[in-house]
Structures are given as structure tokens and as C-alpha cells.
Image: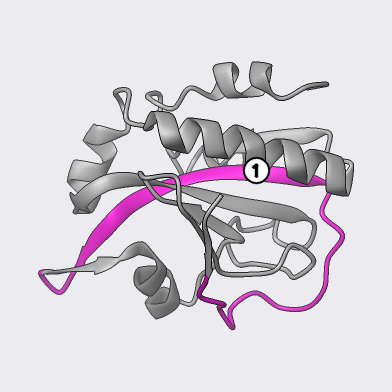
Amino acid sequence: MTEVELLSQYGGGKQVPNRIIIHSMGEYIFEDDNPIPASQFLHNKGFSAHILVSPTGSLIRLRMDDQRAHHAKGYNKDSLGVEFLVEGQHSYATFKERIKENWLTKEQFQIGVSLLKNWCEKWNIQSILRHSDVSPERKIDPGSGFPFEKMLSEIKGL
């Protein structure tokens, strides 16, 4: 598992996570008509996650597991946030359309299962939710094209 650290200042103090929240966002996002990497977009907006999973399966760490991240309003004090990146350059409109269909790469799926299993064992996690589960009135990610049930079935004990 290749992991790069691009540690973010956005998140707050320490935490003991008891749940995981799965997100998705574009690999590159248009800001002022220029595509920028997801990590830079989050930084520019004052947000963070713990890990970004690229389409190639590489991991980008923004926050340490025991640090809070700004990824899910109302859930940041005790959760781990993982962003699966949708390949390519996206506006919000193209992103919303893309996540309706199967978009997760095999590499992302395999690394995602491994990461989530590791977190579940390390932190005794019993709850894995989608961003849309915790904020259904505001959020649609990771989208209907994300194999959520299949991923859960690959993670022992959940």
C-alpha cells in the first residue's frame, strides 16, 4: 500500500474514532475554471479527511487517525473520514452524474477494503456509514455507483 503524507492543519484536536464515514469527490475539481487536485481543493475550503484513495489505489494521508478531520458536519469528533476519488476532472455537475454509475476502480476497492479492515481492527470500529447516510438532506456521496454493500460484506464482522 503506497501512502503519501500531505498533512492538513484543518481538523481540530484528538479523537478516539468509533465509526468510519465514506465519501467521494473528484480526483481533480474545477476551481475558477482550473482543475486542482482534491487535496488542494479540501485545503482551500478548510476541510480535510483522514485518507484519500486515488483511482490507482495510492493513499494520501491528510490527518492522523487519532486527530479530528473536517469531513462530516456533526460527526468529526469521533469518526474516520475516507474520500474515494472519482477519476478525472469534475465540476459538481459532472461529479453528481458520474457517481450514479459504477466508478470505483478495482485498485480502490481492494485498498479500501484493506484500509477499512485495518481501521476496524485498530479502533474497534463497529459502524461504517456513507456521507449520504449522515447528511441525507445535503450530501449524495459516495453515490449509487459505489459498491457499499459489497465492500461491507468483504469486511469481517460487519
Taking the view exactly as shown, the residue that stands out farthest to the left is: 33
Q: Report which residue position mark 1 lands on.
A: 115
Q: Residue at x 58, y 17 (%)?
A: 149
State the residue in front, 114 or 149.
114
- Rendered image quadrant of residue 144: top left
* Residue 67 vertical position relative to residue 52 in the rendered view, above or below: below
- Rendered image quadrant of residue 91: bottom left
Per the rendered image, the range of residues in magenta is: 5-33
13 is within the stretch colored magenta: yes
Give the position of the C terminus as an image quadrant: top right
Q: Secondary structure at mark 1?
A: helix
Q: So how many labels did they put on this image?
A: 1
101 is within the stretch colored magenta: no
Q: Is residue 97 visible?
A: yes
Q: Position of residue 124 (x, y in %)?
A: 89, 41
Left or right: 84, with 117 as reference point: left
Q: Residue at x 86, y 48 (%)?
A: 123
State the residue in front, 102 or 106.
106
Q: Position of residue 12 (x, y in %)?
A: 71, 78
Q: Residue at x 54, y 24 (%)?
A: 148
Q: Position of residue 60 (x, y in %)?
A: 50, 62
Taking the view exactly as shown, the residue that stands out farthest to the bottom is: 9
Amino acid marked by disc 1: Leu
